[in-house]
Structure formats: C-alpha cells, structure tokens
Amino acid sequence: MAEKTAVQLIKKFNVEELKPVSIIYGTEEFLKKQLSEKIKQHTQPIVLWGDETGLKQLKEVFSSSSLFSEGNTAMLYDADSFISKLSKDEVKDFVSFIKGIHLPDRLFIFVKKDRLPAKEPYKTLKEIGDVIVSTPLTPKAFFISVKNKIEKSGKSIDEDTLKYLVERLNNDLYHAKNEIEKLLTYLGDKKDITKKDIDAVVVPKSQENVFAFLDRFFSKDPSALKMYRELISTGHHPFELQSLILNQANKLLLFKTLVEKGKPLESIFSQMNIKHPAVKGSIKKQAAAVSKEELIGLIKQLYSLEISQKVEYMDIEKTAEEFVLKRVAV
C-alpha cells in the first residue's frame, strides 16, 4: 500500500478519507505535532501515552459509546513503548483488536521509528491501516517552505539573503518556526529583510546536546534553563527531557549508594555498564554536585510532574519549564 506523507495530510486534511486505524512514523516530530493538531481539530480524541498505557486500557476506550461525538477516537503517542511491553500473546490480542476497529471509531498510532519493522503488529498495521510517514523536508522543500512563510507575512527577501537565512536554520522545522516568528516581530513595519536583520535576531540551530544540559541541570547552573529552552525549540519534547533527567537521577542515586558502600569506582561503572570515559566523567561530576536527598526529591517531583501533566492535563511545556527553573534557581 502506498504511504501518505504528513505534509500532504497537513495541507489537505480530511479525516473522513482516513481508515479506522492509522500509524504515523518517522523522525520529523514537528510535522507529527502539526498533524496531531489537525486530528484534534476534527475529532475529540482521548490521548494516551505508550509508556503508561496497557492493552486493557486501550481496549476500554473503544468498549463504550462516546458521550460527545459519533464514535470513539484515540491517539496513542510513543506507541513504541506500548508495543515493546506486549507479550507474544498480547501482540496477537492487539492484532485482533486493531482488525476489529471499524468506523466511526478511529485509532491513531504514533511511533518514533524511522522505518516500520516487518514483524507483528506492524505487519498488520501496514496491511489494514493508513501508513503516514513524517520525514524531514528535502533541502529544496525546506527552502521553499521558508520562502513561502516570509512571503505570506508580506515581507520581502532577496535570493542571496534567503539562502543565508536557510543555512542558519539547518533544515529544522521547529527551529525555523521559532526563529522566523522572532524575525518578523523584530522587523515590525519594515518590509525588506537584510542579512543585518538576520544576524540581529536569528540564532543558528543550537549545537548544544542533552548531555551538556544534564551537567548544568544537576550542578544548578542557571544557564541550564536557557539550554533547556533551546533544546525544546529545536525539536525535543518536554517528556523526552523529563525522562532523561529521571533516568540520570536514578543512575546518580545508584552510583552514590554504591560509593557509600565502599565499592571501587571501576567496579561500580562495570556494574552500571558504563564504559566511555566521558560518560564516567559526567557521572562523577554530577554526583559531586547533588546529594542523595536531592536526588530522591527530584525523582519524586518528576513523578508528581508527570501525573499533573498526563492525568490532570496541566500545560506540559509550562510545567516542565517551571520544574527546570525551580531546580536551577535554588
């Protein structure tokens, strides 16, 4: 079956043309987010997260009539985690379940994979559902996208200056959206965009990585907040960064506990399966900057934060940033 592209659907979205089950995969998260918004505009979906959803819970969504619309619609994010938890028997059960979904019920499955495996349940999903791919734009398409956005705003930019701008955006849609909006605000009533304007406002795509962010976060470096915002603006989801912080906090807690027991460092690193010298250095540096009590407190805060976001539906981006700010402002 021919795949659909996220770009095509976003430009001309009609939920009635989609099958009861759709699987969305690929590495371009910005397009997935835009497609999610389109789905939400045309349906009233129940949003589920794969890391905390089981097969029984998913089935329950479709077990009763919808109170607000015709049929039930669910959006399952991070379905990679959901599928990875299924036993062999549960995979068979899941395959039977998705085969039994019929209109007006709809299930949208979002996975992070850059390609879909041939094994179940992906095999059946590809056979019975719509397969939607979300990949980064080609350099030419990205160039045209930036040009169109600027022209629609009523501004003018010559070809050479446009190329200069596009190079700074590095084919990143998240970054492009934020930086172009900043540029347009900066210009005000001015119509023509110059390289001087770009240099004054547009920040090249950040080369900072999440490991540097973790170092600064655990050492309470105030610049961690700026780095966090840059990571969000360039495509990282708050849940991704929260998960990284949680995993690292658990590693540091284990590391400090083993150190207190008097175990040699190399033995500890071997037990934790940490081999790279740079990673060892980061663990030692971060562990020195935080106490066991702080780590336990951070872990509890992260679990409470996730409950507030996923159960109480509090603003994800706002609460995540407030969590980082609270840490580095202490």
Image: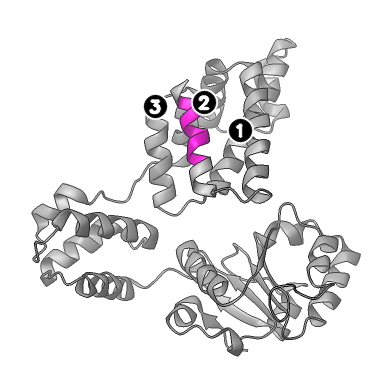
Q: Is residue 258 found left or right of 177 in the rendered image?
A: right
Q: Is residue 178 found left or right of 213 in the rendered image?
A: left
- Residue on which disc 1 sits: 248
Image-quadrant location for residue 273: top right
Contact check, label 3 and label 2, Cβ < 8 Å: no
Kind of residue indicated by mark 3: Pro
- Name the residue rendered at 39%, 51% in the picture: 233
Disc 3 secondary structure class: loop
Disc 1 secondary structure class: helix
- Name the residue rendered at 42%, 32% in the picture: 224
Contact check, label 2 and label 1, Cβ < 8 Å: yes
Residues rendered magenta in the picture: 320-328
Is residue 37 covered in magenta? no
Residue 87, position as x, y percentages in the image: 86, 60
Kind of residue indicated by mark 1: Gln
- Magenta region, main secondary structure: helix
Q: Which mark is residue 21?
A: none
In this picture, is 126 found above or below 293?
below
Residue 215, position as x, y percentages in the image: 48, 29
Give the Cα distance between marks 3 and 1.
19 Å
Coloration of the structure image? one colour
Q: Work out whether mark 2 precedes mark 1 in sequence or the reverse, and give the earlier one.
A: 2
- Residue on which disc 2 sits: 218
Alpha-carbon neighbours of circle 2 within 10 Å: few (<14), some, or many (≥20)?
many
Q: Is residue 90 found left or right of 137 in the rendered image?
A: right
Alpha-carbon neighbours of circle 3 within 10 Å: few (<14), some, or many (≥20)?
some
In this picture, is 258 found above or below 240?
above
Kind of residue indicated by mark 2: Phe
- Name the residue rendered at 34%, 46% in the picture: 206
In this picture, is 177 found above or below 5?
above
- Residue on which disc 3 sits: 222
